């Protein structure tokens, strides 16, 4: 009814309801759920994913080649997305967050906090991997840092590979988990599988990083920065390209929702 005051919050306590008219209480909950909680989940998921990924590289046997890291990275990512994705979107990767933001699937105000959370998660995950690994194995694997590029002549090929490989991953996220027309309950599986396929295909060329947070944490732990910029520029360019391509050919999520409502 016009003129009636609607209670801001209602809490059911046994047989009756206690009405809370304070807007501050509701705003605190809303801000926590919309901004703080997703960032904490991105930190946790990134830490878990990167811990498993780094450990699989450090403990990898020469006999298994790329298979062990490929399966470990893909399965770990699929698992954390299936478990935590409903809270934060399950990005765990700055390149993915950039692509999702460009198509309207993430509030632009959350992009920088997501990046910070993901990078901190990368540091925590790689630190934990270092803590539980034998020292000799850790240094033999360069702390799971990306060391596939050894000379200037490899840079162009490695950068190109990182862009293409990351585009597949970001496309799997944007179309499988964000776009209303194409998203699927199998998204965690398809996203994890894209990582496995990318590592199997491109691991020998660039290391198949596809994730600046995955590159940053081990680089800090091992102090290995050779050609590190490739693993930022390539994935972020891929996220930018996929976001722009989806906006160009399909439109962003906000536009789609408005058209659907009409």
Image: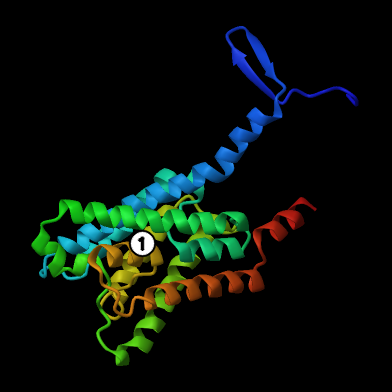
> Which quadrant holds residue 60?
bottom left
Taking 83 as reference, is 112 left or right?
A: right
Q: Is residue 201 left or right of residue 67?
A: right
Looking at the image, which residue sits at the far top?
15
State the residue in front, 183 or 212: 212
The spot of residue 169 in percent (x, y) is 43, 66
> In this figure, which residue is indicated by the disc labeled 1?
193
Residue at 39% in and 77% down: 229
Q: Is residue 189 visible?
A: no
Residue at screen point 61% across, 7% down = 15
Which residue is at a point 61% across and 63% down the rendered structure image?
Answer: 103
Q: Residues within 10 Å of mark 1 (few under 14, many from 20)?
A: many
Q: Is residue 36 above or below residue 67?
A: above
The colour scheme of the drawn protein is: rainbow
In which quarter of the view is residue 135 placed? bottom left
Residue 183 locus on image (x, y percent): 54, 56
Q: Nearer the viewer, residue 207 or 110?
A: 110
SS type, badge 1: helix
Residue 45 is situated, as x and y percent measured from the top left of the image, at 38, 49
Q: Between residues 84 and 251, which one lies in front from this camera angle?
A: 84
Q: How many marks?
A: 1
Residue 25 seen from this side = yes
Measured as percent of width and height from the top left, residue 79 is found at 35, 49
What's the residue at 40%, 74% (across, down)? 165
Q: Does 80 sit left or right of 170 as displayed?
A: left
Pick the quarter of the image with the N terminus: top right
Where is 36 relative to 128, above or below? above
Q: Which residue in the rendered view is the most extreme toward the right?
A: 2
| Horizontal side of residue 182 vs 75, given as left or right | right
């Amino acid at each position: 009814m016009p003129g009636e005051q609607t209670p801001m919050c209602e809490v059911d306590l046994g047989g009756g309801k206690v009405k809370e008219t304070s807007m501050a209480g509701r705003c605190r909950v809303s801000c926590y759920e919309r901004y703080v909680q997703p960032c904490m989940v991105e930190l946790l998921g990134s830490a878990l994913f990167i811990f498993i990924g780094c450990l699989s590289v450090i403990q990898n046997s020469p006999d298994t080649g790329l298979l062990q890291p490929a399966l470990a990275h893909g399965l770990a990512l699929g698992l954390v997305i299936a478990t935590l994705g409903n809270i934060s979107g399950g990005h765990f990767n700055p390149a993915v967050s950039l692509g999702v933001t460009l198509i309207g699937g993430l509030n632009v105000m959350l992009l920088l906090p997501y990046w910070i959370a993901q990078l901190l998660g990368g540091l925590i995950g790689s630190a934990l991997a270092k803590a539980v690994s034998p020292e000799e194995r850790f240094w033999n694997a360069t702390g799971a840092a990306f060391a596939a590029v050894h000379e200037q002549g490899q840079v162009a090929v490695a950068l190109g590979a990182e862009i293409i490989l990351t585009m597949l991953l970001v496309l799997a996220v944007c179309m499988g988990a964000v776009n209303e027309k194409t998203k699927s309950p199998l998204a965690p599986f398809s996203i994890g599988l894209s990582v496995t396929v990318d590592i199997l295909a491109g691991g020998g060329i660039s290391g198949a990083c596809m994730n600046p947070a995955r590159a940053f944490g081990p680089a800090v732990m091992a102090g290995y920065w050779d050609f590190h910029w490739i693993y930022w520029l390539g994935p972020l360019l891929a996220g930018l390209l996929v976001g722009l391509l989806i906006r160009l050919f399909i439109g962003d999520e906000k536009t789609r929702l408005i058209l659907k409502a009409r």
